[in-house]
């Protein structure tokens, strides 16, 4: 329960504002930004996995495995976890999209990667600064839209590939 309360407090922190504060204190690079994003992104999966495990513990195959005398760790890793992975893999592309948009916003505001590095936020900023050249803004918009859409489609395909309930 103590760890669950910690996760609730940690997930209530405004991520973008904390990233802006941390980026103003430290010179950000790719690995630093990746580490900070990982520090905040894992919390989104905790609720999904916990809910799947709580749902799965009352299913018939878990009761049958318990009746056969399997220990709890075997039931968790062999029976409940593969079914919980489907929900996790379903939610994962949305977390990736949120992280990409957050990093793009940081780059656009000037708190992301160093100036001159290739980033989507820099492309959006160039589109904003050069309104007389609409192809810059449109290319930034279409790059982001197509990339985020394709990431969702790839995530759906991976979810379908790992779904244990799907019959081939």
Image (tube, rainbow, N blue to C red):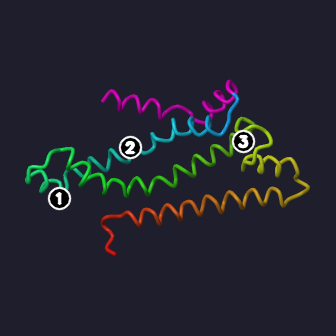
Q: Measured from the top left, where is residue 96 in percent x and y?
A: 55, 50
Q: Residue tagged by mark 2? A: 47
In this view, 72 is above or below 36: below
Q: Residue tagged by mark 1? A: 61
The residue sitting at 30% across, 66% down in the picture is 165
Task: Identify the mark nearer the N-term, 3 or 1.
Answer: 1
Q: For residue 152, what is the image quadrant?
A: bottom right
Q: What element carries label 2?
A: helix
Front: mark 2 or 3: 3
Q: Magenta part of the protein: which range?
A: 1-26
Q: Residue tagged by mark 3? A: 107
In the image: residue 70, left or right of residue 125: left
Task: Identify the mark nearer the N-term, 1 or 2.
Answer: 2
Q: Is mark 3 on a helix, strand or loop?
A: helix
The residue sitting at 60% across, 62% down in the picture is 149
In this view, 73 is above or below 24: below
């Amino acid at each position: 329960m103590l760890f669950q309360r910690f996760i609730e407090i940690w997930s209530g922190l405004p991520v973008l504002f904390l990233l802006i504060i941390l980026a103003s204190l430290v010179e950000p690079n790719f690995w630093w930004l990746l580490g900070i994003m990982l520090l905040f992104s894992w919390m989104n999966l905790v609720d999904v996995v916990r809910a799947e495990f709580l749902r799965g513990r009352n299913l018939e195959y878990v009761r049958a495995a318990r009746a056969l005398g399997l220990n709890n760790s075997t039931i968790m890793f062999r029976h409940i976890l593969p079914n919980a992975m489907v929900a996790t893999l379903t939610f994962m592309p949305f977390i990736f999209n949120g992280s990409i948009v957050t990093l793009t916003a940081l780059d656009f505001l000037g708190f992301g990667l160093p100036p001159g590095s290739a980033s989507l936020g820099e492309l959006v900023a160039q589109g904003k600064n050069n309104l007389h050249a609409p192809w810059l803004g449109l290319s930034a918009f279409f790059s982001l839209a197509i990339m985020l859409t394709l990431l969702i489609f790839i995530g759906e395909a991976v979810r379908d590939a790992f779904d244990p309930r799907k019959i081939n």
